[in-house]
């Protein structure tokens, strides 16, 4: 047998050359600005807060320095209507910003989600050069989504609320309005948020080409303006004490260090506080860990500690309003056991073999929410007591929320927790949450809750 020479060996594929790490340095910022300046159309994503307001005021003051035409005819200011801003924010913008846009005849567009599914697209609420009043909501708002889902914004979700209710509709409008043209989009991240800008830039670099050729520009990052710089200039130019843009139920107010301001605004707008507390109450009724602020005191407790009796009174009035329907909900949850490494490497993602699961690892959570009965608050509470008597079980009272929540547990999770477990309980709450279950939930419930399998 002859020896194989080098030329007899099968050719080896060259090792892939890793792409250079994307860095938002001065060179890239200059390049982005050059492409922004060269774009036929420019848009500003206007969120009503400090940063984008500062950019807008600068565009009005000196458009050419920011790559715009002197008459601002190439600029479209686009606002995504989320639907849960404080009234004070709307008032500030209507009094201090909209008159400036009317004076300069700047195109101002408001867009919003059209429906529950992202596939429903967006709707244009206004498209004008003479804006006088901001729309408070579109057909479907973030609060609608949360209330109907019986949950709150998940702090660990990475600002998915902003992606679904702002970025989605803004990008949809730009793609349709400027199809076939080059568009420069300015985003209001301050210099202290360069990390967010870099994340945005990486997402844009990976995005598939759309109908419009979009380039992103970060004026505040490029010019090095911090949040303090922005606040100072906005208040100097407008002569008003500005407020940050935020939903009145924002879960990030605690992590962002703005809770004192949040509590102040909830004192000023107790009706908004009451709706936020109702949202949290339903979420905590359906999930004991469902408070707005994970591992912290619920909003109700913080409002009470702040002495906001007006908000507490309005919250109680909401719960006891004769027009407020209540529901007796049945909540079922399954927590499957996680897949072991060998399974993840060798088997399909839908593998459910017991040998491929480890009960010490968390798998996929599944939830089913059904309505047992509806009626007044008192009627639903009475029905819950009847269910407890029939089951021969005691109601359990959770006092973590300021308004105690009663549950009838029909199945408890193990303690200590071992995954491949299920729980089931009945609870009363305002009937804002809709019935919902993940696809294939009955099969998963049968396997885990009935047969005792890990997944």
Image (spheres, rainbow, N blue to C red):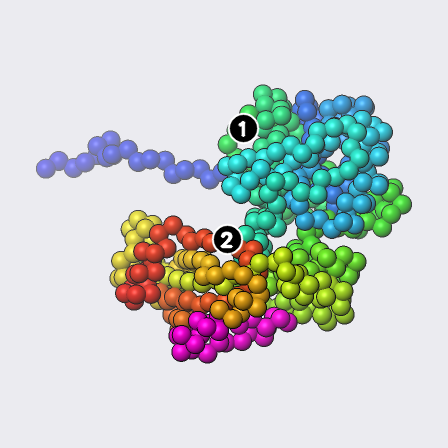
Q: Label 2 belongs to which residue?
A: 434
Horizontally, is 424 left or right of 344 in the view? right
Which residues make up the magenta segment? Answer: 384-409
Q: SS at mark 1?
A: loop
Neighbours of disc 1 within 10 Å: few (<14), some (14-19), many (20+): some
Q: What residue is at 76 percent from the left and 64 percent from the top? A: 310
Q: Where is residue 237 in the image (x, y as percent from the top left)?
A: 87, 42
Q: What residue is at 51 percent from the left and 41 percent from the top? A: 117
Q: Position of residue 401 (x, y in %)?
A: 61, 70
Horizontally, is 42 left or right of 383 in the view? right
Q: SS at mark 2?
A: loop
- Of all residues shown, which one is farthest toward the left? 1
Closer to the camera in the image, 39 or 359: 359
Horizontally, is 204 left or right of 58 in the view? left
Q: Label 1 belongs to which residue?
A: 210
Q: Is residue 210 magenta?
A: no
Q: Does the rendering let one see residue 432?
A: yes
Q: What residue is at 74 percent from the left and 43 percent from the top? A: 48
Q: Where is residue 434 in the image (x, y as percent from the top left)?
A: 50, 53
Horizontally, is 68 left or right of 393 in the view? right
Q: What residue is at 79 percent from the left and 50 percent from the top? A: 88
Q: Does the rendering let one see residue 225?
A: no
Q: Which of the two labelled residues, at mark 1 and mark 2, occupies the earlier sequence position?
A: 1
Closer to the camera in the image, 345 or 269: 269
Q: To which quarter of the image does residue 96 belong?
A: top right
């Amino acid at each position: 047998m002859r020896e194989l020479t080098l030329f007899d060996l099968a050719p080896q594929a060259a090792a892939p050359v890793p792409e250079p790490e994307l860095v938002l340095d001065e060179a890239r910022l200059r390049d982005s600005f050059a492409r922004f300046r060269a774009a036929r159309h420019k848009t500003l994503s206007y969120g009503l807060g400090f940063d984008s307001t500062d950019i807008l005021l600068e565009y009005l003051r000196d458009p050419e320095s920011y790559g715009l035409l002197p008459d601002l005819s190439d600029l479209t200011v686009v606002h995504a209507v989320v639907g849960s801003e404080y009234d004070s924010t709307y008032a500030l913008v209507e009094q201090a910003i909209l008159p400036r846009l009317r004076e300069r005849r700047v195109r101002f567009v408001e867009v919003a989600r059209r429906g529950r599914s992202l596939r429903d697209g967006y709707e244009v609420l206004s498209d004008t050069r003479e804006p006088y009043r901001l729309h408070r909501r579109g057909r479907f708002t973030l609060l609608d989504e949360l209330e109907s889902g019986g949950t709150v914004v998940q702090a660990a979700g990475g600002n998915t609320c902003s992606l679904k209710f702002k970025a989605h509709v803004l990008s949809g409008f730009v793609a349709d309005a400027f199809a076939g043209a080059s568009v420069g989009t300015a985003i209001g991240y301050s210099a202290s948020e360069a990390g967010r800008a870099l994340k945005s830039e990486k997402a844009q670099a990976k995005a598939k080409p759309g109908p419009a050729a979009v380039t992103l520009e970060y004026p505040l990052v490029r010019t090095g303006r911090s949040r303090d710089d922005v606040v100072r200039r906005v208040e100097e130019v407008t002569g008003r004490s500005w407020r940050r843009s935020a939903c009145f139920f924002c879960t990030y107010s605690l992590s962002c260090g703005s809770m004192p301001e949040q509590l102040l605004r909830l004192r000023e707008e107790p009706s908004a506080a009451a709706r936020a507390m109702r949202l949290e109450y339903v979420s905590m009724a359906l999930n004991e860990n469902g408070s707005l602020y994970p591992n912290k005191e619920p909003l109700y407790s913080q409002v009470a500690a702040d002495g906001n009796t007006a908000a507490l009174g309005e919250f109680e009035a909401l719960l006891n309003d004769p027009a407020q329907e209540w529901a007796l909900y049945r909540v079922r949850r399954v927590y499957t056991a996680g897949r072991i490494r060998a399974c993840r490497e060798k088997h399909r993602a839908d593998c459910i073999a017991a040998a491929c699961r480890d009960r010490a690892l968390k798998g996929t959570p599944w939830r089913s929410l059904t309505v047992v009965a509806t009626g007044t608050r008192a009627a639903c509470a009475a029905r819950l007591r009847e269910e407890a008597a029939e089951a021969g079980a005691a109601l359990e009272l959770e006092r973590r929320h300021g308004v105690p929540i009663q549950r009838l547990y029909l199945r408890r999770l193990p303690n200590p927790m071992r995954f491949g477990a299920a729980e089931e309980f009945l609870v009363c709450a305002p009937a804002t949450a809709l019935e919902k279950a993940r696809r294939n939930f009955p099969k998963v419930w049968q396997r885990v809750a009935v047969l005792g399998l890990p997944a």
